[in-house]
Amino acid sequence: MLLNEMMKVERSRHLQAAPYERSEQRQGYANGFKPKRLRTRVGELDLNVPQTRASDFYPSCLEKGLKSERALRLALAEAYVQGVSTRKMANLTQELCGIEVSSSEVSRAAQALDETLSAWRERPLEAMPYVYLDARYEKVRHGGQVVDCAILLAIGVDHLGKRSVLGVSVALSEQEVDWRKFLVGLKDRGLHGTELFISDAHAGLKAARKAVFPSVPWQRCQFHVQQNAQKYVPRQALKREVAEAIRGVFNAPTRQEAERQLDLLVKAYQDIAPRLAEWAVEAIPEALSVFSFPDAHRKRIRTSSMVERLNKELKRRTRVATLFPNEASCLRLVSAVAMEISDEWETGRVYLTIKQ
């Protein structure tokens, strides 16, 4: 979007007239745009190259080849670090394209990007039988201090079995008030028909989910349950044995068999690991909701690993920033990456086969 905006500015200066401007100095006329896909090390960019009539014009940024590409990478990295500061970006466009772009012109480009991302975050939602919830953290400068801000994420699987990122938000914490605001936003946008939520057992998330969607079942992530169990194992020698016992519960063919395996686990460790047995009685049943759903779906909905994979991709793309100057710049980058991934999912193959 920034490159497109700069090319339009360069065309106006080449023609010595703004769009629709009457000027005696005019050196030609604008003649629409020609699409061009530019391959760079930061990915493929779909550009709209400005065309002219009665004038020889071609954007200088597309003539600089590898030098321009390197400048683009530096510009993008610096933009995210600086929160797309208009003053900084005006300087970077000088290096990138050899022309100065005013702060107001950069502001229009950034505003257009924010409007696109905001429209995506606020788009209407439809029925989503399965919804995954999770959070990750990024370092953000807030109030003169560096804090860990929570990136709240929601992914849905629709009735066609296709995945999409339903929502993204940046909050100062992962407390109930933050999760409740996020979930209310999803509900107000039309999220309905949810048959199961899949997430970890964060206290704030649990409380918010019960308040906003009280009648929807919840599946506690089995992977996180396995990890949490190790905190209650008193001896290192028992860790593998406990993990296999819990795995036996989760891999049982039916809910009844899983509950029988759980009873055996509790009795086996009642004396040698009482804290583990007490924890298992409360925690493991929260991870058995999956038995109420089709066998073919259980592997996909028993953990929140899909969100974990999204988080890894977000981390890969945000690590260039290291520290965000404000919440807005963090939300801008995370939204852009999430939107890109969501579009790929929606046009890709089916994640779950759901019979109507």
Image (cartoon, helix red, strand yellow):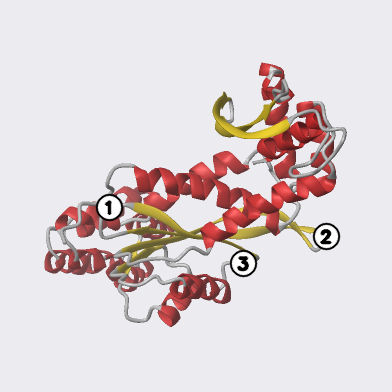
Mark closest to the chain's N terminus, 2 or 1: 2
Location of residue 156 by image quarter:
bottom left
Contact? badges 2 and 1 (CB < 8 Å): no
Location of residue 196 by image quarter:
bottom left
Disc number at residue 300? Answer: 1
Disc number at residue 316? Answer: none
Judge whether 116 appears above or below 37 on screen. below
Mark closest to the chain's N terminus, 3 or 1: 3
Name which residue lies at 83% across and 46% down: 103
Q: Is residue 240 left or right of residue 354?
A: right
* Circle 1: residue type: Arg
Task: Classify 10 Å Cα crowding around label 1: few (below 14), some (14-19), many (20 and above).
Answer: some
The count of marks equals 3
- Nearer to me, 341 or 106: 106
Q: Distance between the residues labelled 2 and 1?
A: 42 Å
Secondary structure found at label 2: loop
Residue extending farthest to the right is 24
Judge whether 57 appears above or below 82 on screen. above
Mark closest to the chain's N terminus, 3 or 2: 2
Task: Classify 10 Å Cα crowding around label 2: few (below 14), some (14-19), many (20 and above).
Answer: few
Secondary structure found at label 3: loop
Q: Position of residue 264 (x, y in %)?
A: 18, 65
- Nearer to me, 249 or 208: 208
Secondary structure found at label 1: helix
Q: Distance between the residues labelled 3 and 1?
A: 28 Å
Q: Mark 2 points at which residue?
A: 144
Q: Mark 3 points at which residue?
A: 173
